[in-house]
Image: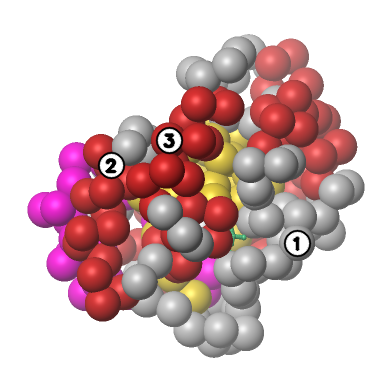
Amino acid sequence: MYKLAPSILAADFSKLGEEVMTIEKAGADYIHIDIMDGAFVPSISIGMPIMKSIRDKTKCIFDAHLMINEPIRYVQDVYEAGADIITVHAESCNHLDRTIKRIKELGAKVGVALNPATPLNVLDYVLDELDMVVIMSVNPGFGGQKFIPYTLEKTKQLREIIDKKKLSIEIEVDGGITLENVAQVMEAGADVFVAGSAIFTGDILENTVAFKEVLSHV
Ligand code: DX5
Ligand code: ZN
């Protein structure tokens, strides 16, 4: 079953609680929460207080995407703020194995994200430990960027690896997904689709329903 993960980065933060309830009602599966530190990525977004403030507004799974250097420093706080899945970037961890283990010890699901130019083989020795791999289809740091086409091939290759090893790992694709290109990302083998600006620009309810409709065609 394909899952939709609206990214609240593109939400209107003055009415975040309401918007989160709207996307849940329209069928969102995960709430994708982009946490940026202004160092690993150029911009700064939101953090634990905002996560906590919406935790009781929805039963959706909180999918926290940490775009911060040495995220191991914050995984406990992010977990306590309500994250169900904690994703770190392979490029931002001095000790990826240790970071993965720390997240699992907390009781959260663990994801690893790869920037567009990072090869899949950085995951060779840790893949079995993961619940999710996030293929970045834009360079992380901002919403509203254009989808990078070569990441489709990367998604296909990861799908093959996961299927061959019979692992139950979700592939999430993040960045630049629209109603126009989502079918291609489905064909490439993704399970979870992040969409920020395509959900939160215009009618949020209609946009979410439209994505769910496409994702329901297997
Ligand atoms: C990029 C973020 C994405 C982004 C998605 O740094 O990780 O989650 O907000 O937004 P859109 O769909 O607008 O590319
Ligand atoms: Zn993200």
Q: Nearer the viewer, residue 58 or 82?
A: 58
Residue 65 placement (x, y as % from top left): 47, 58
Q: Is residue 132 above or below residue 16?
A: above
Q: Nearer the viewer, mark 2 or mark 3?
A: 3
Would you say the residues marked 2 and 1 are in contact, meaning their CB atoms lie under 8 Å apart?
A: no
- Give the class, few, some or many, for how many residues have Cα within 10 Å of label 3's Cα (few <14, many ≥20): some
At numbered mark 2, what does the secondary structure look like: helix, strand or loop? helix
- Callout 2: CB less than 8 Å from ligand 1: no
Identity of the residue drawn at 26% across and 66% down: 16
Q: Earlier in the sequence, mark 1 or mark 3?
A: 1
Query: Does residue 55 appear left or right of residue 84 in this picture?
Result: left
Question: In the image, what residue occupies the spot 21% across and 74% down?
Answer: 49
* N-term mark: 2 or 1: 2
User: Label 1 amino acid?
Assistant: Lys
**In-front residue for pair 201/49:** 201
Question: Mark 2 or mark 3, which has the lower sequence index?
Answer: 2
Q: Which residues are magenta?
A: 47-68
Examine the rendering and report whether any part of residue 140 can be seen.
yes
Is 24 located above or below residue 44 in the figure? above
What's the residue at 67%, 37% (across, down)? 182
